[in-house]
């Protein structure tokens, strides 16, 4: 290619990673002198697993793939969305004109404990840490994480002691025997410049006073630690083990009977175990990746965490729920890498700013993908909707051809498809294609047969063939003519279907696809004519924040009250839901049939419906006692414009099963991170992978990993951005 020619980039898929890569690729004012970019998108909307839609039949309500909430430690995601909103510069009077209007902090997190065969609610309000999450950092050393975690730990232990005031504050004989060796006190004295006998006196007086020694030993910076690593590790481990022995001996008899003691114990035991494990496994020199040989629970057990109360606690279980960490949807066999988990938990606890979590103030499509789409269109990126990628064809070590099916014809082929609709002055994505912009005969067929153009199992090709007596139109994009570079932004579950020839040639790519697991997910949304308090939910903080809850009964262990979205919907006069409740988790499915089994998604969706109804009948009374009892649910509270009777009112709600290859959630099963590739690490010189399944420094299915992958792709192509925060998170910091 002549150096003066533009490089043509074919972007396959419109998820977070692909769109992020384009945000950075098109950031420079003269980008169009270098690149000619076209996005090829299945169906009528971008967004991937984060796509949402507006249902015009039901009050323009927001319909999501599941529950989407950002953590305050998503540094790269907030940096990116802040740039998008700033560059888009919406009019001030427009809804969600700025990212601060589009995202609001959420610090109220609830866990459900199953104790003595009953569910107990564990409310947590995270402390406010001021600042803009875009200005935080994920690039902390192990020792910086440990210093921050230490202060959490100190507070937990202080609260435990205060709660058990009737117990003597001195160390009991059992624990004193563990540190009574005079040599041990002399060893500690070397580190804290204090007389060994004075140290022994402090230990005899109060366990809290002994915590002062950890503060004295923890170094101020990483270089100090590196110079005295073995010396510091040994003594800190000894101190931590003393603390944990005291913790167990002092409070074990209260764990079954006292909720607050049990919860503080779990937090303290978990913190101590992570502390001890990071030191024993020498993570400061080996990196967090070393821990990925173990499952998270396996690693906690290995390092001495209390199995009954800590390893199986709601805190730990809630993290598995957060990551849908149940391969094949088997809730009895959770699996997630320990390194991924520990690093994520430390970042979530230490690196957040402004709010522990942030909730979008409209659908994810409206809040994230509409502004990105509008900005990219303004900059000159081209979008080809209704373009289904069939296969990538290699030649030697390059992608030579991309085979595509054009799903539908437009009503006016001389005009681009305009995908957005306006709801209360906000640009949004509809839940269905805009049929008025599709060829009239094809649109009629699509509606008649209720065709889902986003489904892997769609029977649209057969219906099209039968009706028009010819197959759908095909396109063949050729290297050097239609594209020079390929950004593959379709999720990893689709690679075996779209790239069999690539897998046959590239053994590393094949290993990655084989090793990285995905899991189907399920979700349902309710619109309710009562508030949470009217349903019997009593845990509401003074600041009025609504709950985000995890650790509940399967198969829907996560619930969030998303009432902030109701003002963005447009219900008819007289219909005013007071609550929007979202539920989700993994979906049990081990085998996936060939794409010719067209009724497979329908069967899965019916199972999700029954799962939801069963939860409302048999379990939701634990959360909403005023509208449900064991075996019963008050269906009248569901908002239903059709005013159906009894259980039929559920038919007016929304539920889905995400079984498509590109929709399944990306897992981090133990040992899999070692096989993740970076964006340009295939053997194909013009192929750039992008997605939350790459090696990013997060290595988990989330917006932050997807954003980092997109940034990585842009950097590999054009050098921008120069830095990706937290990218080396699994490597030792030297």
Image: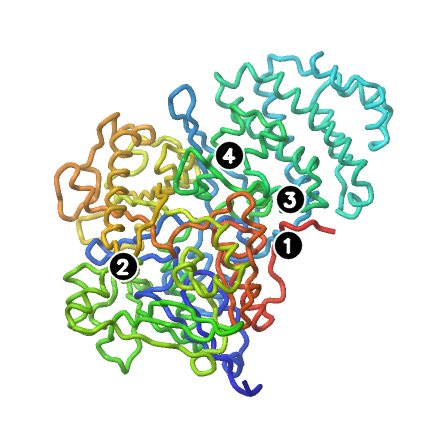
Q: CA distance from mark 3 to mark 2?
A: 44 Å
Looking at the rendered image, the disc whose residue lies closer to the viewer, 2 or 4, is 4
Say the numbered circle drawn on residue 290. 3
Disc with the residue nearer the chain's start (1 vs 2): 2
Disc with the residue nearer the chain's start (4 vs 3): 3
**Mark 2: which secondary structure?**
loop
**Mark 4: which secondary structure?**
helix
User: Residue 47, position in %: x, y?
Assistant: 38, 60
Q: CA distance from mark 4 to mark 3?
A: 20 Å
Left or right, 554 with reference to 461: right
Residue underneath mark 4 = 316
Disc with the residue nearer the chain's start (4 vs 1): 4
Residue name at image x 26 percent, y 34 percent: 614
Disc with the residue nearer the chain's start (2 vs 4): 4
Residue 85 appears anywhere in the view: no
Residue underneath mark 2 = 431
Residue name at image x 32 percent, y 36 percent: 532
């Amino acid at each position: 290619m002549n150096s003066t020619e533009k490089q043509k980039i074919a972007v396959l898929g419109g998820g977070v990673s692909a769109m992020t890569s384009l945000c950075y690729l098109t950031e420079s004012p003269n980008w169009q002198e270098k690149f000619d970019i076209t996005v090829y998108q299945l169906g009528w909307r971008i967004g991937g697993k984060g796509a949402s839609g507006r249902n015009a039949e039901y009050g323009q309500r927001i319909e999501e793939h599941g529950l989407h909430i950002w953590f305050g430690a998503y540094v790269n995601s907030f940096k990116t969305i802040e740039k998008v909103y700033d560059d888009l510069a919406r009019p001030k009077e427009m809804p969600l004109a700025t990212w601060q209007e589009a995202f609001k902090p959420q610090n109220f997190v609830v866990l459900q404990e199953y104790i003595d065969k009953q569910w107990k609610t564990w409310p947590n309000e995270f402390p406010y840490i001021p600042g803009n999450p875009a200005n935080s950092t994920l690039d902390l050393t192990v020792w910086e994480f440990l210093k921050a975690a230490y202060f959490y730990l100190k507070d937990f232990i202080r609260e435990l002691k205060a709660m058990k005031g009737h117990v003597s504050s001195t160390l009991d004989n059992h624990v004193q025997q563990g540190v009574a060796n005079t040599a041990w006190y002399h060893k500690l004295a070397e580190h804290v410049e204090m007389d060994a006998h004075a140290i022994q006196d402090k230990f005899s007086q109060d366990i809290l006073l002994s915590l002062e020694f950890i503060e004295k030993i923890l170094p101020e910076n990483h270089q100090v630690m590196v110079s005295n690593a073995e010396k510091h590790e040994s003594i800190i481990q000894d101190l931590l083990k003393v603390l944990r022995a005291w913790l167990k001996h002092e409070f074990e008899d209260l764990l079954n009977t006292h909720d607050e003691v049990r919860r503080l114990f779990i937090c303290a035991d978990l913190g101590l175990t992570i502390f001890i494990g990071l030191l024993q496994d020498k993570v400061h020199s080996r990196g967090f990746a070393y821990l990925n040989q173990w499952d998270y629970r396996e690693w906690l057990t290995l390092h001495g965490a209390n199995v009954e109360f800590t390893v199986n606690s709601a805190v730990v279980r809630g993290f598995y729920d957060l990551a849908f960490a149940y391969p094949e949807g088997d809730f009895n066999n959770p699996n997630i890498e320990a390194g991924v988990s520990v690093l994520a938990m430390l970042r979530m606890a230490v690196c957040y700013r402004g709010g522990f979590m942030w909730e979008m103030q409209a659908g994810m499509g409206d809040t994230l993908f509409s502004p990105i789409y509008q900005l990219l269109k303004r900059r000159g990126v081209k979008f080809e909707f209704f373009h289904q990628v069939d296969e990538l064809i290699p030649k030697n070590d390059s992608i030579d051809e991309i085979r595509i099916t054009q799903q539908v014809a437009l009503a006016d082929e001389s005009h681009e498809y305009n995908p957005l609709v306006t709801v209360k002055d906000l640009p949004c994505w509809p839940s269905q294609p805009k049929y008025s912009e599709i060829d009239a005969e094809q649109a009629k067929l699509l509606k008649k047969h209720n065709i889902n153009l986003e489904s892997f199992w769609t029977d649209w090709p057969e219906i099209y063939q039968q009706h028009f007596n010819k197959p759908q139109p095909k396109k063949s994009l050729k290297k050097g003519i239609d594209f020079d570079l390929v950004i593959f932004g379709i999720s990893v579950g689709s690679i075996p279907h779209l790239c069999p020839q690539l897998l046959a040639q590239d053994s590393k790519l094949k290993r990655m696809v084989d090793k990285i697991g995905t899991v189907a997910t399920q979700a349902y949304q309710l619109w309710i004519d009562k508030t949470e308090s009217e349903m019997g939910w009593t845990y509401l903080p003074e600041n009025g924040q609504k709950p985000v809850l995890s650790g509940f009964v399967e198969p829907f262990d996560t619930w969030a009250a998303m009432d902030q979205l109701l003002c963005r919907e447009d219900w008819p006069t007289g219909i005013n839901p007071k609550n929007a409740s979202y539920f989700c988790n993994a979906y049990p499915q081990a085998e996936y049939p060939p794409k010719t089994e067209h009724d497979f998604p329908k069967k899965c969706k019916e199972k999700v419906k029954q799962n939801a109804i069963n939860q409302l009948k048999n379990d939701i009374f634990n959360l909403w006692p005023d509208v449900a009892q064991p075996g019963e649910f008050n269906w009248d509270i569901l908002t239903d414009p059709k005013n159906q009777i009894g259980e039929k009112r559920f038919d007016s709600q929304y539920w889905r099963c995400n079984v498509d290859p590109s929709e399944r959630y990306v897992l981090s099963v133990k040992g899999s991170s070692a096989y993740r590739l970076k964006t340009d690490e295939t053997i194909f010189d013009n192929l750039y992978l992008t997605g939350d399944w790459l090696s990013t420094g997060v290595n988990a299915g989330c917006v932050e990993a997807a954003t980092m992958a997109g940034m990585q792709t842009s950097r590999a192509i054009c050098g921008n951005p120069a830095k990706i925060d937290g990218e080396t998170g699994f490597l030792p910091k030297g």
